[in-house]
Amino acid sequence: DLFCRGFAERLISDGIVQALHRDLLKAFKTDMGAAFTKQMETMAKDIDMTPAVNREWQKHRRTDAAQVDVQFHVLNAHTWTGLSPGDVPLPGVLRSPLEAFETHYLEAHKGRCLKWCLLVGEATVEAHLQSVHRITVSTPQLVLLLHIDSDPEGQSVGDLLQHSSMGREAFDVAIGPMLGATDEAATPPLLQGPAGRAVADLRPEDRLVVRAQFSSENRELSFVPRGTASRARGVKEDSNELSMSRSYQIEAAIVRVMKAERVLELQELIAEVVKQLRVLFLAQPADIKPCIDRLVQKDFISHDETRRDIYHYVG
């Protein structure tokens, strides 16, 4: 379940099925059987259908009312079990295309129903600041940003919480990257709040405003929170369970690599495993080495007789 969830998040984030996704599915299907990949293959088919769904929608929408360009994913609820329907209070200019698409889609597909999962959506905004930037934000961030920008003096935290209908934890996750609470040091804060106050310490009366002097050499910027997709979906992950799931994935990748290469040095093996798993997560050498040791103990691979940093596939 955790493996499928990570795969689903990557597909939604990328918006397309990358060649690496297909290679990964093919490898897993060979090693673990069709039952293991059936759900993920259906997910990939849903994503593959996205361009056709949106082309059909573009033919029927009212072009004179199209103030924004909206793209939709239509995902099978029985397959995408990790997604939780959720709404956010979108302004009319954004709500209207959703309602029009829903009417169009249900007329074309009788007997179906649509439930919106807006918490996992993303938007790209053209921001005219010191210079023009294309800024990518999550849907909750978009709602907050539009409300803040509606007043030159910004908005108070209390008003933003009330307007967005967010809980405080979800608010902190959304607002944090835009206030500079991010690992991306090269990306300056988009918003300005009380000096020296952490996101979690913001008070209801504190005001947030778009930084008038915002400037960056990068014309395309992303403030989408990292590592928060599962929380946005209403999913509570146990860290031990997640660690165990990733260990299984790492071990499977090691076996695939060794089966193909037969003999590899340790650093070459680690590099290949990282490459195979990068579509799902960034595997760390410190996590890979214990998995290699376990596979040696299980007699899937073995040390070279003369050099312990060289491994052989046992088959």
Image (cartoon, helix red, strand yellow):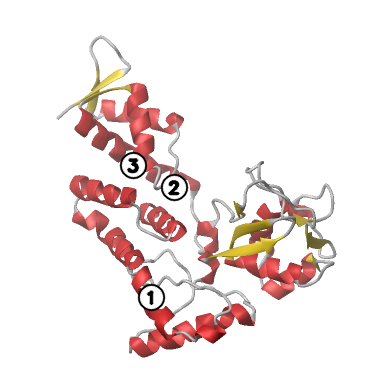
For this rendering, which residue is in front, 239 or 113?
Answer: 113
Residue under the point 51% across and 65% down: 120
Residue type marked 3: Tyr
Which label sits on residue 114?
Answer: none
Residue under the point 23% across and 12% down: 305
Image quarter where the N terminus lies is bottom left
Residue under label 1: 55
Image quarter where the C terminus lies is top left
For this rendering, which residue is in front, 257 or 219?
Answer: 219
Q: Compared with residue 197, is residue 128 higher up or lower down, i.e. above or below? A: below
Q: Is residue 141 left or right of residue 80?
A: right
Q: Mark 1 or mark 3, which is nearer to you?
A: 1
Q: Earlier in the sequence, mark 2 or mark 1?
A: 1
- Residue 290 seen by the camera: no
Q: Earlier in the sequence, mark 2 or mark 3?
A: 2
How many numbered badges does the structure rendering display? 3
Q: Position of residue 43 (x, y in %)?
A: 33, 63
Which label sits on residue 242?
Answer: 2
Q: Residue furthest left?
A: 315
Residue under label 3: 248
Residue type marked 2: Leu
- Residue 305 seen by the camera: yes
Q: Gap between marks 1 and 3, in whole Å?
A: 40 Å
Kindly state the secondary structure of the residue where label 2 is placed. helix
Q: Position of residue 58 (x, y in %)?
A: 43, 79
